[in-house]
Image: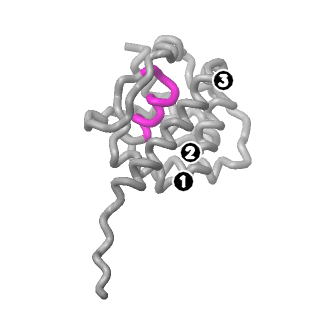
Amino acid sequence: MARINSFSVVVAMFLALGLVVLSPGLASRVILESESEAPGYYDHDTDFAPVEAFDNDDFPPETLPNDPNADFLEACARKLTGDCGESIFTNIFANDSTLVNDHCCHLLVAMGQECHNKLVNNIIDKIPEYKTNETITRPRSVKIWNKCALVADTVSPASSPSEN
């Protein structure tokens, strides 16, 4: 049970990374409930570390260095809903079978590639447990972004017909 609570805190960190950087103790009080059961498009690979590899009962660390991008990262994290942030996070950082659905892809693309990249980079750079799997998580992050960008472009709302 401790692993589930710890993992929930990790997911919460992705959603509110700016707050974690500014006030790390706050993340330990956040618990997310997954609602990401919707079908999606993303096809998962199986060559990534199991969730157990990320288990750390002391997560998050009580002190993280101040980040000059904290306000930017916080604004980025607020653009995703809880279920979408969790789905995207677990697809990048854990060997999860949850799919990133089209709605979440639209939110990710609306958030912007710079936000996505900086959030991922900040997690990898600040948390040693994720730094060790950097060669796996960075390409996975790019793959998710590319697929979501394609979905957002393909499934965008139809424009009204032009009158001639």
- Distance, label 3 to label 1, CA atoms, is 23 Å
Residue position marked by numbered label 3 in the rendering: 131
Is any atom of residue 55 visible in this view? Answer: no
What residue do we see at 63% from left, 44% from top? 118
Please tell me which residue lies in front, 49 or 154: 154
Q: Position of residue 10 (x, y in %)?
A: 50, 28
For residue 62, above or below residue 50: below
For residue 97, above or below residue 40: above
Along the horizontal axis of the image, is 153 left or right of 111? Answer: left
Looking at the rendered structure, the kind of residue marked 2 is: His
Q: Secondary structure at mark 3?
A: helix
What residue do we see at 50% from left, 30% from top? 92
Looking at this rendering, what residue extends furthest in the front direction?
164
Q: Which mark is residue 116?
A: 2
Labels 3 and 1: the sequence-earlier one: 1
Looking at this rendering, what residue extends furthest in the bottom direction?
164
What residue do we see at 34% from left, 54% from top? 155
For residue 71, above or below residue 134: below
Please tell me which residue lies in front, 140 or 66: 140
Q: Position of residue 164 (x, y in %)?
A: 31, 88
Residue position marked by numbered label 1 in the rendering: 112
Region in magenta: 85-95
Q: Position of residue 81 (x, y in %)?
A: 39, 47
